[in-house]
Image: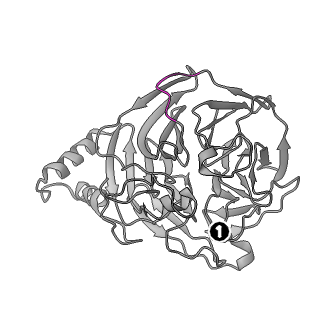
Amino acid sequence: MLWTVELEGGPQRVNHAAVPVGEKIYSFGGYCTGENYRTIRNMDVHVLDTVTYRWKAIEIRQERKLVPFQRYGHTAVAFGHLVYVWGGRNDTTACNILYCFDTSLHLWSVPAVGGPVPEARDGHSACIINDHMYIFSGYLEYMESYTQDVHTLNLRTMTWAYVRTAGQAPVYRDFHTATGVDGVMYVWGGREVASGWYDSPEHEEYGSDLYALDTAASRWSIVPCSGCIPIGRRSHSAFVYRGQIYIFGGFNSREKCHFNDLHRFNPVTSHWEEVTPLGKGPCPRRRQSCCVVNSKMFLFGGTSPKDNYEEVTTQEEGALEEQTDRHLKDHNDLHVLDFEPSLKTLCLIQVQKLRLVTTWLPRELQALLQVMSLPNTITRPLNHTG
């Protein structure tokens, strides 16, 4: 594994939702510190060409009722060429309307759905298993509490259903991850609140247990894991490559620590291990997106402590989370992790590293070198340190 590309200038977004469709990655919404999230406005959509590493903002010209409002803490899943966006909130309200984005036409729609629609929430998780989208946990807007509920949306019939589960379910939580592998939904991490009611940062927990929901039997279990189990955290990323689950980054407020480590879980052996890719990786962060296309993982966005700032250790006026957010910087960078770097890629990286003259190279290789080093222009450079 090798970190091969680091480019700035992409969308400056935090708590966005992104999915790969073919060789492109679509990123929906999220927030950027300083922007207005009380006024209702259309959700922004950005698309990344994973061959050229170029970002593009998609212009949406549709009537308001068909387009989701700009939000954060939502989820997105891809089903064929369609992307389903659900949940999330702005600074005023949360949403439980299902929206569909057609990546072929670049058009939004609001599909007609049947069954009991889940309550509006944010910080939940969503994943695809067979023909169903599974929704788990999150923070319920109308109850001001967390949930342990599981809901499914049959993407063939567009029908919602509440899933009655057995076994030991994960405790109430938000900003965890749920990953589907071979009919099992694996839930890990998140901010745990045992009572379901959040009253103060001192009462949130960060467990490292891995939960598995057998979707055929609707039964939860705690996976008996071995190896180097990652420390509990929230707002991390989870992705799958060759049947194994990877966990990157995140934040633990009890430890007052952001992470940029990478752990791998093998569902067959139930073994965890920490992996250290070669090359220069991202700085510690949370609330980023990670998407796998072919043999590469594309990481972008997120937030981390500002330079020369030690995380909040004393109690000030306001919530600890709000204090910490004031001292965070939002990223617009893109990092590429290549699981199977080719000889061509390795040679191009050496050409860059040694600053060799490239005029003698074929035009195709010159073009590749250019896209590997040319920043995007969606937002201005932020002078990142990693």
User: Is 331 left, or right, of 102 in this rendering?
Assistant: left
Query: Which residue is located at x 85 percent, y 46 percent?
Result: 161
- The answer to if 287 sits in the magenta stretch is no
Please provide percent x and percent y for residue 309.
35, 57
Image quadrant where one finds the N terminus: top left
Please name whichever residue, 96 or 157, is drawn nearer the observer in this view of the structure.
96
Report which quarter residue 364 is drawn in: bottom left
Please name whichever residue, 66 or 102, is drawn nearer the observer in this view of the structure.
66
| Residue 15 in view, yes or no | no
Please provide percent x and percent y for residue 29.
58, 65
Toward the right, the furthest residue is: 115
User: Is 103 left, or right, of 100 in this rendering?
Assistant: left
Report which quarter residue 382 is drawn in: bottom left
- What amino acid is at disc 1? Asn
**The magenta segment:** 225-231
Please provide percent x and percent y for residue 66.
73, 73
Against 283, residue 16 (above or below) is below
User: Is 384 left, or right, of 200 in this rendering?
Assistant: left
* Label 1 residue SS: loop
The residue tagged 1 is 90
SS assignment for the magenta stretch, majority:
loop
Q: How is the protein colored in the picture?
A: one colour
| Residue 117 in view, yes or no | yes
User: Is 297 left, or right, of 239 in this rendering?
Assistant: left
